[in-house]
Amino acid sequence: MLPFRIVVGCCLAGFAAAQSVQHHVVPASAAAVDADSFGWLAGASTPLRQQHLVGPQHLTALVGRALTALEFRRTAAAEAYQGGLMNLTVTLAHAPHGPLEASATFAANLGAGGVLVFQGDVALPPSPATAAGAGVAVGWTASNVVRVQFSTPFVYQGGPVCVDVVGAPVAGQAADWWMADAVSDPVVGATTDLGGGCGAYGGAAKRWSSVSAHTLLPGAHASFEAIGPAWSLGICAFGARAPQPIPLALLGFQSPASCSLMLASVDAMMVAPFVPDANPALQHLGGHAAVALRVPNDPAVFGATLTTQWLEWTQQATSNAIEWSVANAAPTLGMALLEGHPQEASGQLTVHLAHVLRFESQ
């Protein structure tokens, strides 16, 4: 029979091991080296809300453990960061869906079981320059890391997690430039500019509309944007590509001869105003209109192709038309990032780009 003190010692050693602090980096490939992108942190320089959705494939080692801190590491760059101070509110939740089913509405990603794990000021440390480029070794040291020590632990039970961060700079201590490490997915959609634009915007080529190829992904919100007269109305039309340009004047519009419809059919339309910049010095540039189209995470949409063209109502002018295709595969990043103003209910969703995160757990 073992002496009592040996039995007690073994039990205490086992308990200590069970309670040992561990660190877990998402994605694991960035644990010791810089990933291939970078991004702002909420509150570093401006009020911002960021939701980080993390798929369960990244978190299996944390099941049943209490998450006690979250860290962001600076990106590798040949520039020193001066540091700053920001006020953060951090909430963690078992998300009701994975990253490729994420909503552009903040509340929908948190669900009903969010836990407020931190509220208070967090320092952005002064950080010396590093070697630049993806793959450079960057340690999780105090001068490289923004650390959020939770006041309330969050016990992870499995499944996707939503990390909700609402931040604002502390007055007079905003960081002019403090970029955190981020990772991107190489999957991308395709776009072809078909021309057909006219009117007062878009330069000589009249290219005043655009489509982000990085948003043409299963699970993403495809983003379509245009520039036009401030507070005018824009109509974004979707359909099949026309075999040849159709002069808009032929359809009864009072339009310049250079305006051409590039759609053989109009299958859907979305309307958006051209909103001018809040900065008066930039309002002479016109207004910005944007619409988004949810792309389901479904093999049925892989490679699907449509053409988009805008009509600006006051000029009765057509934008350049863009034929676009959804990527042929879903992104495998297993993460999503939703960003927006803290007072807004929704934001801009990306499923191809996310911050590198390090969780501390016990």
Image (cartoon, rainbow, N blue to C red):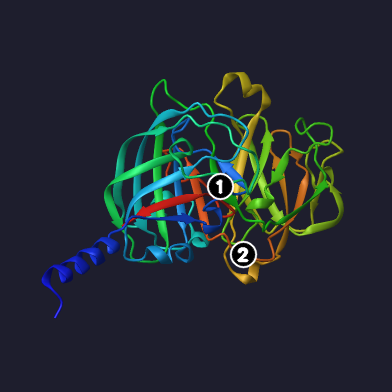
Mark 2 to mark 1: distance in Å? 19 Å
Q: Residues within 10 Å of mark 1 (few under 14, many from 20)?
A: many
Residue 191 to residue 301: above or below = above
Residue 136 vs residue 90, the one in the foreground: 136
Residue 170 in percent (x, y) is at 38, 26
Q: Residue at x 69, y 54 (%)?
A: 238
Residue 124 vs residue 273, the one in the foreground: 124
Point out the frontmost of discs 2 and 1.
Answer: 1
Of the 4 image quadrants, the one containing the C terminus is bottom left
Q: Give the residue furthest to the bottom.
A: 1
Q: Residue at x 44, y 27 (%)?
A: 84
Residue named by callout 2: 330
Q: Residues within 10 Å of mark 2 (few under 14, many from 20)?
A: many
Q: Give the residue furthest to the left.
A: 4
Residue 65 to residue 1: above or below = above
Residue 118 in percent (x, y) is at 30, 43
Residue 80 in percent (x, y) is at 56, 29
The quarter of the displayed image where residue 17 is located? bottom left
Q: Is residue 78 left or right of residue 6?
A: right
Q: Is residue 114 left or right of residue 337?
A: left
Disc 1 marks which amino acid?
Ala
Q: On residue 93, which mark appears?
A: none
Q: On residue 182, which mark appears?
A: 1
Q: Secondary structure at mark 2?
A: loop
Disc 2 marks which amino acid?
Ala
